[in-house]
Image (cartoon, helix red, strand yellow):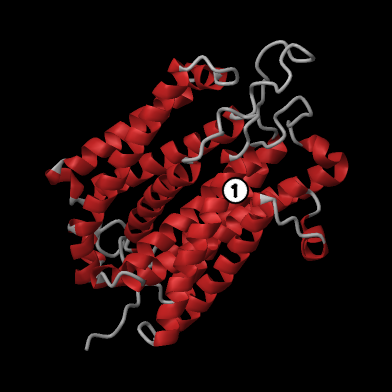
Amino acid sequence: MSAQLNAPGRLNGPVLAMGLAGLVVGIAITIASLMYSGHAAFNTTNDGVSWGLPVAVYVFFVLASTGLTFVASLAMVFGMREYYPIAKRCVWLAAATLIAGFASLAFELGHPFRMLWAIPLSFQISSAMNWMGLFYTLYLVFLLLKFSRMHAGDWDSGASRNLGLASFLTVIVAHGTLGLVFGMMAMRPFWYDGLMPIYFLATAFLSGLALAVFITHLAYGFSTQNMPARIAALLAGALPRVFAFALGLVILFVAFRTITGLWSNADGLEAFHWMVRSPWFWIEAAALIVAFYILMSPGMREAARPQTVASVLVLAAIAIGRYEFVIGGQVVPLFKGTWVPGLIEYVPSLTEWMIALAAISLALALYAFGEKALDLGAEPKAG
């Protein structure tokens, strides 16, 4: 492909148009369906699967946002200046994915604006879900304030550094409360685990790295020749190595968690057998292994196309994993034999798929807008 076709920013217009088109279609169908059928438009039921695809999409995006903030914090908080060339892009994309996740959850809730008065007037201090909402909101505020500082050219002042640290610390707490929302549910053995926040932390960092690699290549037309020298050096050096380390760690997490679940005969862990019987689990596993092979091969790890393939494989695997996690925790009925003799069956409805389309499209549109209008490739001036 010619340098002209791969010119930086060449793809921003098509990505923005695609994002806006998907957003219009997704929201239009979703609103029409919800107005006609209400929550019956979802294939969730009172049998047990009450959190469907929109919640899985929410978890995917908010943890991707967490991971992107971790990547940006390598420069903003830990002083690894070689990561500055991608920091601004990662901060903006972290905000975009967080907003996309909130949008998916808002459609699932049905009446999200009730939170504006219900939460402050009747805040449940013992509810991890309430704290999760509070800390993710604070995180978004700190993230946008930090981005505004970076966009104004203030990268290293005391106020700018404090905002970077605040966003980093707040997202760790928010991430921990999201892990607790699932991990404290003793009646759902597939989720119940004190280490669930750590598992979320590892997979969030991996998804952030995968998005950082993919979006950086997308921003420069998938050609390292179009990249500034510092970004090309980062993609040929430290970033893919960190990516490989995080991927190897997550593969071990997934393997050990799955083996433990299959070995145990505790009631409720039949969900692990449900998971491994699905072809999607093996697609997820194959994608992670192939991506790890690419990133561990020096000849491929530093090349643009293999890096892009590895990032896409990892994102696809994580998306499958989020769906397995959210749905798998609910397929075993709480009162087996009472009204559901076996595992609960769930297939997302058209409305739920349209919510997913709208969330993905919103993230793409926000990202492309940032590339066109906000100079996401900027970094601190030398000196």
Q: Answer with left or right where residue 259 lies relative to residue 47.
A: left
Looking at the rendered image, the quarter that the N terminus falls into is bottom left
Q: Answer with left or right where residue 35 lies relative to residue 11.
A: right
**Where does residue 338 sit, x and y in percent of width and height?**
79, 13
Q: Residue at x 42, y 29 (%)?
A: 257
**Where does residue 87 sit, x and y in percent of width and height?**
36, 69
- In this view, the residue in front, 378 or 181, is 181
Looking at the rendered image, the quarter that the C terminus falls into is bottom left
Element under disc 1: helix
- Quarter of the image for residue 224 reads bottom left
- In this view, the residue in front, 288 or 268, is 268
Give amino acid for label 1. Tyr
Q: Answer with left or right where residue 194 lies relative to residue 126.
A: left
**Where does residue 54 sit, x and y in percent of width and height?**
65, 43
Q: Which residue is mark 1?
A: 58
Q: List the single residue furthest toward the right.
A: 36
On screen, residue 190 above or below 344: below
On screen, residue 215 above or below 349: below
Q: Residue at x 44, y 40 (%)?
A: 318
Q: Residue at x 50, y 61 (%)?
A: 171
On screen, residue 358 above or below 185: below
- Quarter of the image for residue 6 reads bottom left
- Residue 21 visible: no
**Where does residue 62 sit, x and y in percent of width and height?**
54, 53
Q: Answer with left or right where residue 194 lies relative to residue 350.
A: left
- In this view, the residue in front, 319 or 261, is 261
